């Protein structure tokens, strides 16, 4: 089917537009990475000499290191919570028929409809009202709210595609329903769990807009980078950015190898 | 009965989580109708809507979100076409590039654009170096910079839903049109384009709402010279502790987003109805 359309002039034109646009869209990532190797404190492209000093300088900025560790822990814990909730809720929503199921589904997906600025403000106002000022918890709750719908959507769609008869067969052969879930259903869920973990981790680790409302002292990495950009533009920001660009590109390529890139877009 | 109870038990944690979020959202609604003493009043709405500067920012947020959405559609539709019709190698190369761009850290992407558009950035160094201009051209800390940043950040939001729909449309329909004597462009515009409207709709809605309520991009690439409604909400809430005013601005933002979502859906129904 595809091959017939490949040589069509319209497809060629569309491909040309895609290449030019994507070159422009990814060029800043390339520039950022290269500027991290500047020799002087000017963040310019092409660099005015080469050095690795700005990478070492990351370690000399404790607020960046602390923010990175904080974001990592936050992303791991919020993803773990969202995935667990996602598995349990997806099983309930797909395996059992009950009135109001679609309504509950829409309700659980509702955080994705609200712009992040408003989500951030909501939690800020809420925490101020109830007097909860706890840097980690104040971010954990919104991050779980933000990542959970992605986990639910991915896991739910994989459960819908599965054949429930297989699990029934296991039960018919004498396995308990819990045992048949772990022996039959869970192994089939693995690719979707991988995708869900990927999404949750990235959504949490990358989150800036909602988090900016909720970090007064314990800043997340994106918020800390934002503050640093506003105060100075020395190449240390390029260095940490380069590390982030290379690692997210690495994870996208791993995801492409494991489940295929079309599963994560 | 027992099974239903079990389902409820399984759903309880997630329902509690999202209920917590809706309570937080409601607290913004409540906060927006309270004055500084805690009494019921529309003071915050009056002071937001009564100040011409806020209205200007609100309208320029709607306007920039509108035209960035149009630009993303014009650039994004061909990308989605290329993803669904090129040879397998080319298509996966395009998808991979778009995924790498999409999953890069948002603040890092915008920082990258600052390195391109700034006075000492890639473009200005090229222009100055080749002698085309004698002083740097202002490409950021203005509306142009914010529009470029928003287009780059929102482009995947437009491409992915359109691509998802295009993947499901069989090329046989277009081939039938070609067989009946239609040109290739005509076949694309009158067969594939209408069939891909659901994807375009989701893309348009995602892109518009994302751009309209943006805060990071105007913060960095507008640099305080070009503000959007997100910047007003953030400044009022975080820097001035003026929660009530920020809440009123947030409610207005949410309302406009909802009106846009409903409006886009209605417009597409009218268009679909007009064709039949």
Image (spheres, rainbow, N blue to C red):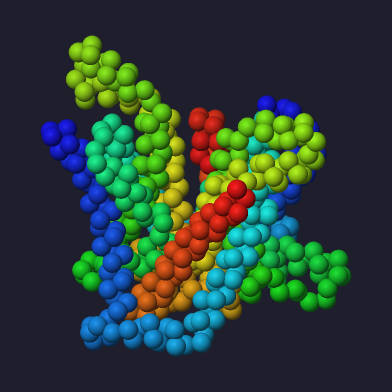
Q: Residue furthest front?
A: B276
Say which of A130 and A176 sits in front: A176
Q: Residue furthest right?
A: B131
Quarter placement of the N terminus of chain B: top left
**Residue B222, position in %: x, y?**
59, 72
- Residue positioned 45% across, 47% down in the render: A202
Q: Is residue B209 visible?
A: no
Q: Is residue B190 visible?
A: yes
Say which of B10 and B242 sits in front: B10
| Quadrant hosting residue A189 | top left
Say which of B115 and B198 sits in front: B198
**Residue A133, position in %: x, y?**
25, 67
**Residue A77, position in %: x, y?**
32, 47
Q: Residue furthest top?
A: A173
- Residue positioned 71% across, 59% down in the render: A45
The image shows residue A239, relative to residue B10, as above or below, that is below
Residue A46 appears left or right of B253: right
**Residue A95, position in %: x, y?**
28, 31
Say which of B63 and B231 sits in front: B63
- Residue positioned 72% across, 32% down in the render: B175
The image shows residue A94, relative to residue A215, as above or below, that is above
């Amino acid at each position: 089917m595809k091959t017939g359309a490949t040589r069509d002039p319209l497809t060629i034109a569309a491909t040309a537009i895609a290449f030019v646009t994507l070159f422009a869209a990814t060029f800043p990532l390339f520039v950022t990475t290269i500027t991290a190797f500047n020799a002087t404190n000017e963040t310019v492209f092409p660099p005015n000499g080469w050095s690795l000093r700005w990478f070492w300088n990351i370690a000399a900025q404790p607020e960046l290191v602390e923010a990175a560790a904080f974001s990592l822990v936050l992303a791991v814990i919020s993803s773990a919570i969202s995935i667990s909730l996602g598995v349990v809720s997806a099983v309930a929503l797909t395996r059992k028929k009950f009135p109001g199921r679609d309504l509950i589904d829409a309700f659980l997906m509702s955080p994705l409809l609200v712009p992040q600025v408003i989500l951030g403000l909501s939690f800020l106002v809420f925490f101020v009202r109830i007097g909860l000022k706890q840097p980690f918890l104040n971010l954990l709750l919104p991050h779980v709210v933000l990542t959970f719908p992605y986990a639910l959507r991915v896991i739910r769609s994989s459960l819908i595609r599965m054949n429930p008869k297989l699990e029934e067969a296991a039960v018919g052969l004498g396995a308990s329903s819990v045992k048949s879930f772990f022996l039959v259903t869970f192994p089939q869920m693995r690719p979707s769990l991988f995708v869900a973990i990927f999404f949750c981790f990235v959504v949490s680790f990358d989150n800036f807009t909602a988090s900016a409302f909720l970090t007064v002292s314990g800043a997340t990495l994106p918020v800390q980078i934002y503050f640093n950009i506003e105060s100075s533009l020395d190449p240390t920001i390029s260095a940490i950015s380069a590390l982030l660009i290379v690692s997210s590109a690495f994870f996208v390529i791993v995801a492409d190898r494991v489940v295929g890139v079309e599963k994560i877009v | 009965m027992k099974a239903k109870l079990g389902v409820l038990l399984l759903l309880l944690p997630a329902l509690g989580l999202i209920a917590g979020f809706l309570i937080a959202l409601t607290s913004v609604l409540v906060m927006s109708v309270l004055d500084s003493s805690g009494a019921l009043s529309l003071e915050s709405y009056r002071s937001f809507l009564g100040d011409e500067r806020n209205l200007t920012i609100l309208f320029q947020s709607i306007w920039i979100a509108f035209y960035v959405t149009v630009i993303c559609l014009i650039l994004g539709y061909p990308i989605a076409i290329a993803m669904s019709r090129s040879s397998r190698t080319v298509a996966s190369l395009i998808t991979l590039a778009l995924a790498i761009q999409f999953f890069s850290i948002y603040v890092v992407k915008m920082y990258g654009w600052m390195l391109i558009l700034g006075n000492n950035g890639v473009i200005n160094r090229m222009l100055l170096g080749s002698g085309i201009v004698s002083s740097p051209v202002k490409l950021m800390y203005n509306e142009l910079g914010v529009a470029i940043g928003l287009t780059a950040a929102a482009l995947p939001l437009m491409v992915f839903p359109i691509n998802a729909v295009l993947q499901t449309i069989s090329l046989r329909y277009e081939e039938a049109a070609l067989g009946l004597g239609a040109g290739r462009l005509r076949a694309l515009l009158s067969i594939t384009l209408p069939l891909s409207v659901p994807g375009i709709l989701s893309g348009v809605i995602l892109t518009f709402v994302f751009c309209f309520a943006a805060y990071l991009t105007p913060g960095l690439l507008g640099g305080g010279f070009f503000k959007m409604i997100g910047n007003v909400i953030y400044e009022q809430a975080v820097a001035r502790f003026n929660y009530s005013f920020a809440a009123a601005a947030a409610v207005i933002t949410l309302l406009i987003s909802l009106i846009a979502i409903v409006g886009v859906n209605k417009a597409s129904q009218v268009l679909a109805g007009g064709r039949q």
